[in-house]
Image: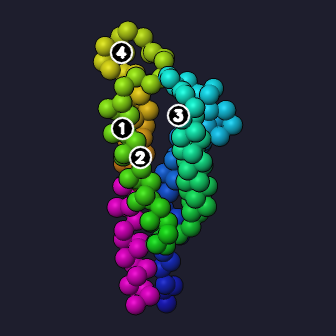
Amino acid sequence: MSEPQMIQARHPLSVIFLLHIALEVPLALQGLWSPVALPFLQLNNTAVVFLKLYAALVAGTCAAALLVFSLPEFLPGKRALAIALCLYHVTCSTVLYNAPRIIPYSFGTFAESYRIIPETVWGTLHGCVGLGFAVWWQATVMMTQAMRAKTE
């Protein structure tokens, strides 16, 4: 007699939720405690308020990502959060790629000649995390379908 095959509760690609936290938590913490210390150009009072609001929102997504990380892949809440974070990161990537210079640092003239600036590096990281969520989604579809078939 063979035992029924168990569905793995957490896929290894779930680490993407932790990568979201690693990318976002520094800005969230600094934005909440001391947004004027962030290396952004032209921070006026309005920008500081919006930065604090953004930091609070990002801190909330980090808390949600931490909470769902260990949950099974087939749960609708985890999948909904993954899609929301995918859209968020892809949008951030696009915005940062098209943004004017907002960070007054440089990686040198050689890097700048290839448009390797803090904004595009940050945008690339967001794009990679957004792609990671899409890959996680596709990699776990079979688990979700198997669980759905099991409950019907």
* Pair 1/4: label in front: 1
Assess whether residue 144 is covered by the magenta stretch.
yes
Q: Which amino acid is tagged 1?
A: Val
Which label was assigned to residue 95?
Answer: 1
CA gap between label 1 and label 4 equals 19 Å
CA gap between label 1 and label 2 equals 10 Å
- Magenta span: 134-152
Which secondary structure lies at badge 2?
Answer: helix
Q: Is residue 46 placed above or below 132 in the rendered structure?
A: above
Which label was assigned to residue 112?
Answer: 4
Q: Is residue 65 placed above or below 35 in the rendered structure?
A: below
Residue at screen point 65% across, 40% down:
32
Q: Earlier in the sequence, mark 3 or mark 4?
A: 3
Q: Which amino acid is tagged 4?
A: Glu
Q: Which amino acid is tagged 2?
A: His
| Mark 3 crowd level (few <14, some 14–19, many ≥20, 10 Å Cα) | some
Viewer-closest of 150 and 32: 32
Which label was assigned to residue 89?
Answer: 2
CA gap between label 3 and label 4 equals 27 Å
Q: Earlier in the sequence, mark 1 or mark 4?
A: 1
Residue 126 image point, x, y percent: 42, 41
Which label was assigned to residue 47?
Answer: 3
